[in-house]
Image (cartoon, rainbow, N blue to C red):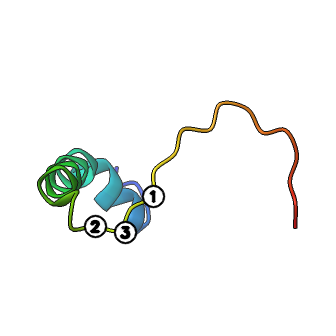
Amino acid sequence: MAVNRSFTDYVYSRFYNKFYLAIEGFIEENLDNLDLRLRKVRNIGEVNC
């Protein structure tokens, strides 16, 4: 019996690993050209608005 699911669910279940690996490879190869500000946040003390 066929199961109804969204297109998003289908793409996620079928291609997630391929997308992830492609994006990871692109970022590793182009890290110097991308304007990424990466930070590790261990604890959030307070939020200022």
**Quick one: label 1, few (<14), some, or many (20+) residues within 10 Å?**
few
Of tags 1 and 3, the one toward the viewer is 1
Res 8 label: none
* 32, 7: nearer the viewer: 32
Disc 1 from disc 2: Cα separation: 9 Å
Label located before the other in sequence (3 or 2): 3
Q: Which residue is painted at 35% across and 68% down in the image?
A: 35
Label located before the other in sequence (1 or 3): 3
Q: Which residue is painted at 54% across and 38% down in the image?
A: 40
Residue bearing the label numbered 2: 34
Residue bearing the label numbered 3: 7
Q: Is residue 1 above or below residue 33?
A: above
Q: Which residue is painted at 25% across and 49% down in the image?
A: 20
Look at label 2 and name its amino acid: Leu
Q: Is residue 36 above or below residue 40?
A: below
The picture places residue 10, in percent across and down from the top left corner, at 32, 58
Look at label 3 and name its amino acid: Phe
The picture places residue 16, in percent across and down from the top left corner, at 28, 50
Residue 40 as seen in the image, left or right of residue 13: right
Q: Which residue is painted at 45% across and 50% down in the image?
A: 38
